[in-house]
Amino acid sequence: MRIVVCVKHVPDATADRHFESDYTVDRVGVDGLLSELDEYAVEQALRLKEKAESPEDVTVTAVTVGPEKAADAVRKALQMGADAGVHVSDEAIAGSDAIATSLVLAAAVRKAAGGGVPDLVMCGMASTDGSMGVLPAMLAERLGVPQVTLASQVETQGDQVRIKRDGDTATEVIGARMPLVLSVTDQSGEARYPSFKGIMAAKKKPMQTYSLVDLDVSADQVGLSVAWSVVEGTEARPPRTAGEIVRDEDGSGATALTEFLAAKKFI
Amino acid sequence: MSEVLVLVDHAEGVVKKPTYELLTLARRLGEPSAVFIGTADAAGAVKDNLARYGAEKVYVVDDADIKGFLVAPKAEALAQLVEKTSPAAVLLTSSPEGKEVAARLAIKTSSGLITDAVDIAEGGITTQSVFAGNYTVTAKVTQGTPVITVKPNAATPQEHTGAGVVEEFAATISEAARTAQIVASQPREKSGRPELTEAAIVVSGGRGTGGEFAPIEALADALGAAVGASRAAVDSGWVPHSYQVGQTGKTVSPQLYVAAGISGAIQHRAGMQTSKTIVAINKDDEAPIFELVDLGVVGDLHTVLPAATEAIHHRKG
Ligand SMILES: Cc1cc2nc3c(=O)[nH]c(=O)nc-3n(C[C@H](O)[C@H](O)[C@H](O)COP(=O)(O)OP(=O)(O)OC[C@H]3O[C@@H](n4cnc5c(N)ncnc54)[C@H](O)[C@@H]3O)c2cc1C
């Protein structure tokens, strides 16, 4: 079985994230890391491999699209236990929207799987920066396979996949047959930390770097200038004006709270 | 004027409120046409409501053959409707399903996609809130038919009588689109409280509750509010995941958000920062949540909330 996990290198959410003058996300001035939500996808891929009857027949390849530093995201996946890595890097890609990114990623997924569609393409539920959560569906559309998303539990048997999903109104079990695109949530199980052994082993694992030419994607299909939507402006949210802080002493907190709610007509 | 397609978000024929918000926003872009994927009977039952909020047309796509299948058939049906009507835009709700249908539709129709809009102005200029609510972004689709998903509470539904002409639309759904399927479904117990993402008031509890959610629920009920939670409370198994507010839970934007025993981590803020009024109760006067509040109470939630709840009941008489 062939599993390809898509991982994204994102600016640290706890840092001061901001935009460049062309409204793209500053990916250089802020520390980056493997999106925490993608760690869950790597984790689930590794668990599927470990649970397989013959784990050596399952390959897990981590794929990323992004600037030079993005290779760190793949490296982390290798340290966690993925078998191989693919990094697509090309200056023309900078500023691509989700639609163009999905075009490149779909090509990269095929390349990583030796030309065809792998049995499983796994993703996190959303990135922690753009957080659109649409890439799994776009990839599935481009690869011509179904997607099952937001899994909190994953089981496979042969080419059958069953997932559990906590929907708004119901908990659902969804069934589908490979090949497919699968996204997992942060409820699917804590991601492992790379062990010392894992970190050492990762250094010897194969890592391919591709440009657009290698993927047969033309540079004029991607990048900021051909994005199908444009940002017209960005504005930092004005800091909320400092509110009133009351220290609760002998019930003063509850009184302040009740009076505040009444004054604002919430009662 | 061009049509604007609005995919009706409904559960077994009960239309969800965000659909009326979409119809209201759609009027800024053209003539709203509701797209109802369900049974003809259910469509008949809801068409008057859709018309009351401005639907000039109601396209009915019979779902007998596609019920239970995920996303892909809906995207195919919508793509065929886009082909037929050349609409000014397609609007969907920003639910996980709405976003996935939108994603496939955008690729099928070679169109730009904007997700999680909190407003749409004339000319299709959208406003989004990004980086945990720290920035707002205005954007516009420049290619194809704008496909836009809109967050709940982005607009107040406005009544505006539309003709509501029902038109059956026979979509051709491929075999390939009918593969991923719901095989079992366990409905969640109804709490009787408002829907978290639609509620005007949300009262949330975090790790600071110590697992004791009764004071949170009592205050919520006194205010007619929905109950929310931090991930720490969900991970501890105190409340179901459907209560979670934040980056990997729900995004809420109510009139009033009350956070009790929640520290205010960036991932939690991502789900509540755009609330109109924010109140926090926390023992620690240095908790980051206090940076956001209109009113902060430094104190123990186990004493403050019950006393406030009692005072509210008292006031209401
Ligand atoms: C990828 C990722 C996604 C995440 N997604 C989410 C998400 O969607 N939603 C989310 O909430 N978190 C999310 N988190 C987790 C987030 O980082 C925090 O860990 C979490 O929000 C903390 O929850 P908390 O505030 O309840 O707990 P804590 O941070 O432990 O805070 C508890 C607070 O309660 C106060 N307290 C304790 N006792 C009392 C008392 N008796 N009375 C009053 N106050 C008291 C304490 O002073 C403290 O401030 C995510 C994290 C990651 C990495």
Image (cartoon, coloured by chain):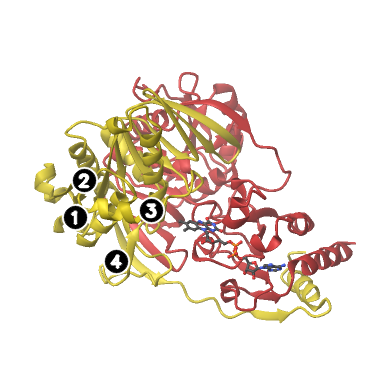
Given the current orientation, which residue lies at the most extreme front position?
A197
Q: Is residue A244 above or below residue A95?
A: below
Distance in Å between CA atoms under marks 1 and 4:
15 Å
The three-letter code of the residue at mark 1 reads: Ile
Chain A drawn in what color?
A: yellow
Relative vertical location of residue A214 with respect to residue A16 in this rendering, above or below: above
User: Which label was assigned to residue A93?
Assistant: 1
- Name the residue type under label 4: Tyr
Kindly identify which chain the residue marked by label 4 belongs to.
A
- Secondary structure under tag 1 reads helix
According to the image, label 3 marks what residue?
Answer: A127
Q: Amino acid at mark 2?
A: Val
> Which of B56/B306 is in front?
B306
Say which label, 1 or 4, has the lower sequence index: 4
Question: For the residue marked with disc 3, what is the amino acid?
Answer: Ser
In which of the image's four quarters is ligand 1 placed? bottom right
Chain B: what color?
red
Q: Are marks 2 and 1 in contact (CB under 8 Å)?
A: yes
Kindly identify which residue carries mark 2: A104
* Location of the N terminus of chain B (image quadrant): top left
